Each structure stands twice: as C-alpha cells, then as structure tokens.
Image (cartoon, rainbow, N blue to C red):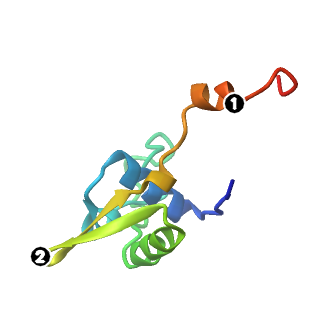
Amino acid sequence: MVVYQFDKPTETIFRYVCENPKANLIMLECLHNDYYNPKKSKANDNPKLYGDYAKSCTDYLVDCGLIFSKKEGIYTFFFPSAKGIAVSYTHLRAHETSQDL
C-alpha cells in the first residue's frame, strides 16, 4: 500500500474533489484550510484562499494518480480516480485474520 503525504491544502482539495466530482480549478482556488472545520474560523475572519497554490496541489494529485482531469472547452474538471477512492472499514476488516484482531 502506498501512503501519500499531503499538506493541508492538498488534503482539503483531494477531499473536495472526492466529495464533488467535476470540480474545476476556480472552485478549488476558493477553498481554504478551515473549509471543513467552520467552527475553527470565526465569522469576522478572512481565511486565506488557496488561489494559485490550488494548481500545484491538483498537479501533484494528478501525478500521484489520485485524481484525473478532463478538459471540456476552456475548463478543466477534476475527478477522483479509482486509486484515490477510500476503501470502506468493513472491506478492510474482511481481510483481517484472527491474528490481526
């Protein structure tokens, strides 16, 4: 099994693409570190958006094979690949033996 090391922006973008297939770069540039933790950011905070760094994150995820891109007209959309889809806990438990428990 391959384990990939992500920084926070890459992790957030990967999670967003998995939950929102056909995400485009404009959507991803608007994400920020507290996107999945709204309680952490305060109402008057202005979180730093990923902006141009989102492109580097998607390039890394595409290179790893965890997402793939598809160009339609002037837009590039991102989708999770089969390699990047998480395996369910039940599926993992099915492979355990009594020694592992």
Q: Position of residue 58 (x, y in %)?
A: 42, 70
* Observer-nearest of 65 and 14: 65
Mark 1 residue crowding within 10 angstroms, few (<14) / some (14–19) / many (20+)? few
- Indicate the amino acid at tag 2: Gly
Left-right relation of 44 to 95: left
Q: Secondary structure at mark 1?
A: loop
Q: CA distance from mark 2 to mark 1?
A: 44 Å
Q: Indicate which disc residue 73 carries.
A: 2
- Indicate the amino acid at tag 1: His
Residue 34 in view: no
Q: Position of residue 41 (x, y in %)?
A: 46, 49
* Observer-nearest of 56 and 62: 62
- Who comes first in sequence, dot 2 or dot 1? 2
* Observer-nearest of 79 and 58: 79
Give the residue drawn at x 45%, y 70%: 62
Give the residue drawn at x 52%, y 43%: 86
Q: Position of residue 65 (x, y in %)?
A: 49, 66
Give the residue drawn at x 40%, y 50%: 18
Q: Indicate which disc residue 95 carries.
A: 1
